[in-house]
Each structure stands twice: as structure tokens, then as C-alpha cells.
Image: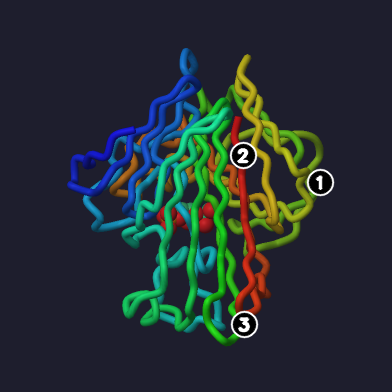
Amino acid sequence: VTLTQTSGGQPLLKVANAFAESEICLFGGHVLTYRRHGEAPLLWLSDKAVLDGSKPIRGGVPLCWPWFGPAPARVGSGKSAHGFARTALWTLDGVSDHEDGTLVHLSLSDSDETRAQWDHGFVLELDVLIGKELSLVLTTRNTGTAPLVYSGALHTYLQISSPEAVSVTGLGTSYLDKLNAGQLTEQQGPLTVSGALDRIYRHADTTVVVQDGEQRIHVTSGNHDSVVVWTPWLEGASAMADMSDDGYRTMLCVEAAITDEAGITVAPGEEHSLSTVIR
Ligand code: TA6
């Protein structure tokens, strides 16, 4: 384990063990890369990702928290999309070696800065296990005196060989189509990728399987209410300064998410964990 810096000067933890190697940036509490020895990278990281702390990082596993997408009415207007956890500087609390891998523990607590966006006392903890699989547990602890309501996502960018090679199973038979005013839409069979997608699957299996040619990626979610699948396709990619025009061809986001308007309520002193395991 070494602590170094990104090209943009942000603290970066590099982990290499018997199973895999991974890089975790303290800006955003952001897992940038993960690769099992002898295998292809599991996560996609944009070659134009901005790593200087001036904006969210494109790729890896951005932490959307304490809301998913545009700020909901309960939070108020003028707040950043996907919350502030992905643009905050996290604290590295510890790194420990275990039989099944290296456990990295990061945290983020409320401050004047976070209270300006969201007036709650909290400790947000991220446990990342770098082993033969990649596991992330994001725990929201309410340290205040009033209930807090949150939503969010582990916005995982998977590395794929090409959209044409991919089919995704386990998503269920309907989704909310964010590219069509959130309309509830039926789906028959596996998802194939031939254009922009921005979908919320409310009845997906716990484990969604991304078949990519010969390779099979499993994404297992925990304590979520939906699985989000997103790709910007060419139009979306060319509109993003931090993604190459052809970047969309090698990524697909499959996200363990809490997207329901009502969010998750955490009582004072209580906690709630959203998790994902990718293998
Ligand atoms: O998870 C899908 C989504 O919410 C899309 O609507 C799309 O905007 C994407 O996330 C990326 O958001 P970002 O703020 O990182 O550009």
C-alpha cells in the first residue's frame, strides 16, 4: 500500500496484494481502478478524467450521495447533481490486510461546507475490499438529532470490450426510462446496448450479469431499491469535456442505487449501508 498523488495533486492510495491491484482517490472517496492479476481492468476510467479536485471524476465508482441525480425537493434547488460526496475530500482511517484481501476504510463527516448543502449531522463511511472481487459498502450514520433522508448510488463504470459484445441479464421485465420522461417501459429478455440508455430497474435480481463476449461480470447490490444502467452513447459523450468521443464504446454503468423519491430514512443514532460487489 502506498499513498501518493494523482496527476492533479489529489491524495491517491495504491493497493496491490496477492489478488489484485487498485487505486483509490481520497477526493470523492473514489475507487478509480481495480484489476485482478492476469485479467482485464474491471472498471473504466476516462482518459480525460479530471483528477485535480475541480470536478467529479469520470469513471471508476463515483459515490452519489446524499441524493441521486438532481437535488430532490426536500433538499432545495441550486445543489449539485448527485450530491457532494463525490467532490469532497475524504479521510483515510485505515488499511488492514485480511485473508480475503485488503480492506480500506474511508470516512466523511459533516462540516460547514456539507451543512451549506444539506443540514444534517452524519458520518459517511466507505469500506472497500480489494480481493478476488471488489466490494464497496457505503454506510450512512445519522449523528444528528433529527431523522435524515438520503438516496444515492455506487455509480460503477464497468469496462467493456464493445457495446455490441454485451448483454445484461437479471434486470427484470420493466424499467423507468429517464430518456423518455421516466416512463415505465416493458423489457423482454436481456438488455442489449445499441444507443443511449438511462434506465432505472426497480425489480432487478440481487445479482445482475453483464456478459461481454467470453467474459462475465457479476454486479451484486445490497440494500438498494434499484439498479441503474447508463451509457451516454456518442451524442452524450461528445457533449462531455471529460470523455473522449469514443469513450462510450468501452464503458457501461451498472449501479446499485437508491432512486425512490421517498429515499431512505435513517433515525438519529442509526445507520444504513448501500453495497455492491463486482466480480
Ligand atoms: O446514473 C445515470 C445518471 O444519473 C445519468 O442521468 C447521467 O447524467 C449520469 O448519471 C452521469 O452524471 P454526471 O453528473 O456524472 O455527468
Q: Residue at x 66, y 75 (%)?
A: 265
Amino acid at pointer 2: Val
Crowding near pointer 3: few (<14 within 10 Å), some, many (20+)? Answer: some
Percent coordinates x, y for residue 232 in the rendering:
48, 45
Amino acid at pointer 3: Pro
Percent coordinates x, y for residue 75 in the rendering:
51, 81
> Which corner quadrant of the image does residue 191 belong to?
top right
Task: Decide: is 167 above or below 103.
Answer: above
Q: Residue at x 36, y 58 (%)?
A: 90
Percent coordinates x, y for residue 137 in the rendering:
57, 50
Amino acid at pointer 1: Thr
Give how far apart the Cα atoms at labels 1 and 2 are: 23 Å
Give how far apart the Cα atoms at labels 3 and 1 are: 34 Å
Q: Residue furthest bottom?
A: 146
Quarter of the C terminus within the rendering: top right
Mark 1 or mark 2: whose residue is earlier in sequence: 1
Crowding near pointer 2: few (<14 within 10 Å), some, many (20+)? Answer: some
> In the rendered image, which residue does mark 3 sit on?
147
> In the rendered image, which residue does mark 1 sit on?
173
Q: At numbered mark 3, what does the secondary structure look like: helix, strand or loop?
A: loop
Task: Decide: is 74 above or below 25.
Answer: below
